[in-house]
Amino acid sequence: MNNPSSTPSGWNVGRQCALVISVWVLFLVLLGLNNYVDSILGGARPGFWEIAAFPLASFGLWIAFTPGILVFIQFVRRFVPSRTLWISAHLICAVTVMVLDAAGWMILPASLRPDLASISRPSWKFIEINLLQGFQWNLWMYWTIVGIVYGLQYYLDMKDARVHAAELENELVRAQLQTLKQQLRPHFLFNALNAISGFIHTNPKAADDMIGNLSSLLRLSLDSGDAQSVLLKEELRALQLYIEIQQVRFGNRFTVETQVDPETLDAYVPHLILQPLIENAFHHGLSKRTAGGLLRIEAARRGENLRLCVADNGPGSSGHSTNGSGIGLRNSRARLRRLYGEQAMLKVEDTKEGFAVEAVFPFVGRNEELH
């Protein structure tokens, strides 16, 4: 048997008692209506007491027994681990309650049970006959209480289990996202430091400028903390520092064009989503050109989605795979999938001008809820 050590908050014995008694009151009303209809069909015109007396007495006794039964159910749930003992405990309790119910009729008016008027009260004979006559009904009443308690308890346990499972899933997703994000930082840092090292001896001023930009970029990255999403304008501010590092490295070999819809600046984007796309453009596109390189960055809203595109006029894939299998693109695709599921995509393709990477995911504004 499932034996939880505690009852979930909001589902205590008091609330259970109120629920079960409400069921008894409903049955009481239905039984009274049934008696009334039977009397009308028989040609009689009964008064209120004639209709309500027996249901009130019958269910009144069970209303009195209900709190004790519920306390016993909680005791069994907590301390009886064996299925056999569980069944035995409830059978003993059921019989005990039925005996008490049979005895309870002895203190009620004899007119309620005219069929037992000839039997003296109190007596074991009265209890025995009353017990046998109401055995099936009272047994059903007892197990109705047990069924209500365990049925709702099962529902609440399943609900709690689903909530707990969802929380664990969210924690797992956050951990996986954080891992993917942390993988990008050392990857980017290695490439930036590699670029700086080339100027240490040949162009110290350029190396110094690059170190300054790298320091500012890392400071922005640290300031973002564990945030998985930032505003696009913040992402672009950090991206500008990276581009300045590359401009020192490549000199006049490329220019940058930006087409950013002002509406998108206050939209949330995955942190560091653009940097690996830009890095891919430099590594596989612009670095292949000796002059005239063009880096184009676009951001626009398309209905309910935000579209980010990074394109270059490099040689493209030259017929090779364009799935984006490098660590930057691979992690970017994985992060989008984790954050937005099937609502997001990362498309990598050759174009007439060169090569383009496009990220599309749900548009979430500053004033909208961010999940």
Image: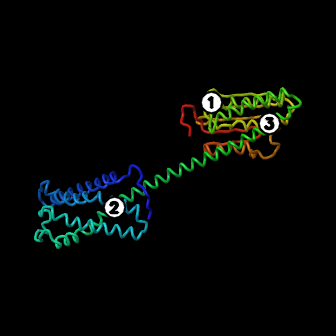
Kind of residue sitting beneath label 3: Leu
Location of residue 41 in the rendering, given as x and y in whole percent from the top left corner: 16, 60
Kind of residue sitting beneath label 2: Phe
Q: Which residue is mark 1?
A: 264
Q: Name which residue lies at 61% across and 43% down.
A: 339
User: Would residue 214 appear left or right of 73 to someone viewing this image?
Assistant: right
- Residue closer to the observer: 365 or 150: 150
Q: Which residue is mark 3?
A: 193
Location of residue 302 in the rendering, given as x and y in whole percent from the top left corner: 62, 34
For mark 3, does the 10 Å Cα neighbourhood hold few (<14), some (14 to 19), or many (20 or more) residues? some
Q: Name which residue lies at 79% across and 31% down.
A: 246
Cα gap from disc 2 to disc 1, whole angstroms: 62 Å
For the N terminus, the quadrant is bottom left
Which residue is farthest right?
202
User: Would residue 146 appear left or right of 51 to someone viewing this image?
Assistant: right
Q: Which residue is mark 2?
A: 72
Kind of residue sitting beneath label 1: Thr
Task: Please tell me in which quadrant of the rendered image residue 130 appears.
Answer: bottom left
- Residue closer to the observer: 121 or 149: 121
Whether residue 229 appears in this view of the structure is yes
Whether residue 115 appears in this view of the structure is no
Task: Please tell me in which quadrant of the rendered image residue 346 appears.
Answer: top right
The reply to whether discs 3 and 2 touch (Cβ–Cβ < 8 Å) is no
Q: Name which residue lies at 54% across and 31% down.
A: 367
